[in-house]
Amino acid sequence: MLKDQGESLKGKRCLILGSGRHARAIAEKLLQYGAIPLTFSDESGHVYEPDGIDGAKLRAISNIKAERGAMLGRYVMSSTTATFNEPTNIFDVQCDLCFPCGQIKSVNEDAVNKLADNGCMAVIEGGHKQVTIEGRKALRSRGVAYGPHIVTLTGANIDNAYGHHLEGDKLETEVQRIYNDVKETATEFNSRGDLFAGGTIRGFFRVANAMISHGAV
């Protein structure tokens, strides 16, 4: 998505919703690409590191979340720079990219408008159904790129199909192939740039073709 816009992850300030293993894995990958994770959240609220969450801070958060019943708010006791629930609304944190990985339907129309007003370029789902229907419409109207879960979560399925022995370069190639297929399908069906539509249509055809190959009508 960023390459299509002539951009990269390097230096991008990233809002992360959630703090489970998936959210922390995304933060780790963002650090590898030179991006700057800013936040994590859970039932207790959200922590915000204005200068970013580096590897040491990420390990501290992971240690807290590994304890049974531990809440994210404890992290501020080990950091002199973090704030807890400040600003009150996590979507008021200025960012370039948003990665919702928490509760479903956590990004609604109001959240999208806040993100867009603060200069967010894209919302990339790191969990299932993070963005509401109204939120998807707002993303389109505000010109914010959207990576839907039906496309962004294919990596795990690819890895499983290869028996969990997929090298990084091969995985990247496969993800790029799927992205191109989805983008081309969206364009073919008059939904240029709409990866949600492209992914849905592409998935429908894959299921239909499989059924036909097994003799279904």
Image (cartoon, rainbow, N blue to C red):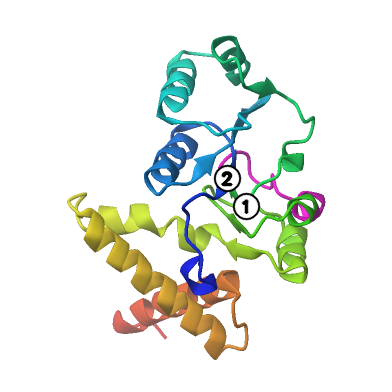
Residue type at the position of mark 2 = Cys
Q: Nearer the viewer, residue 97 or 205?
A: 97
Relative image position of residue 14 (x, y in whole percent) = 57, 45
Give the left or right position of residue 179, taking residue 163 as reference: right
Q: Is residue 131 visible?
A: yes
Q: Nearer the viewer, residue 164 or 122?
A: 122
Q: Is residue 44 visible?
A: no
Relative image position of residue 205 (x, y in whole percent) = 45, 80
Magenta stretch holds residue 177: no
- Callout 2 touching callout 1 (CB < 8 Å): yes
Q: Residue tagged by mark 1?
A: 96
Q: Residue tagged by mark 2?
A: 14
The segment highlighted magenta reads 100-113
**Which residue is at 59% across, 9% downward?**
77
Relative image position of residue 39 (x, y in whole percent) = 60, 34
Give the left or right position of residue 195, taking residue 57 as reference: right
Q: CA distance from mark 2 to mark 1?
A: 6 Å
Q: Secondary structure at mark 2?
A: strand
Check disc 1: other Cα within 10 Å, few if <14, some if 14-19, many if 20+.
Answer: many
Residue type at the position of mark 1 = Asp
- Specify the label residue 62 is tagged with: none
Q: Is residue 210 above or below residue 16?
A: below
Q: Closer to the N terminus: mark 2 or mark 1?
A: 2
Q: Is residue 164 above or below residue 196?
A: above
